[in-house]
Amino acid sequence: MNLLNPHPTHDLQQIAAIKQWVSATFGLDDQTTILVTELRCSEPGCPPLETVIALLRPNRPPQQYKLPQALPDITAADVAALGTYASEGEPYDHHHG
C-alpha cells in the first residue's frame, strides 16, 4: 500500500488496451486524445465504480461515455457497444439509459 497515494494503481496495460479498442471502434486518428478514468459514483442506482471514456478531438465538442464497470472489467465488446450508440448520435451512459 502506498500511503502517499491511497488510490489503487490501475493496470496500465488495461488502460492502453481500452484506448486501443476505443481508437479502433471510433476510427480515431493521432489528433484525438482518449481519456480513460475510473470514478466512484454516489448517485442513487449507480454502480459503486464506473469507467468514463472521453474523446477530445480538435474542432469538435468532447464526447463522453460511461460504463458501469471498474477498469479491469472492461472488455473489447463493452467498447464496441459504445460505437453502436455513437453512430446513433446519442451520448452513451449505460446505467442512466
Image: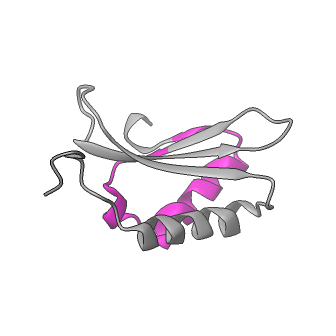
- Describe the colour scheme in one phrase: one colour
* Camera-side residue of 30 and 26: 30
Which quadrant would residue 12 be assigned to in this image? bottom left
> Which residue corresponds to the image point at 52% horizontal and 68% vertical from the top-left?
16
Which corner quadrant holds the N terminus? bottom left
| Residue 44 location (% of width, % of height) | 23, 26
Figure check: 67 above or below 23: above
* Camera-side residue of 69 and 7: 7
* Numbered circles on residues, count: 0
Figure check: 37 above or below 63: below
Relative to residue 73, is residue 16 drawn left or right? right
> Which residue corresponds to the image point at 86% horizontal and 35% vertical from the top-left?
59
| Residue 24 location (% of width, % of height) | 69, 69
Bounds of the magenta segment: 66-92
| Residue 33 location (% of width, % of height) | 68, 50
| Residue extending furthest toward the front | 4
Which corner quadrant holds the C terminus? top left
| Residue extending furthest toward the top | 43
> Which residue corresponds to the image point at 75% horizontal and 32% vertical from the top-left?
61
| Residue 65 location (% of width, % of height) | 53, 44
User: Does residue 96 belong to the magenta stretch?
Assistant: no
| Residue extending furthest toward the right | 59
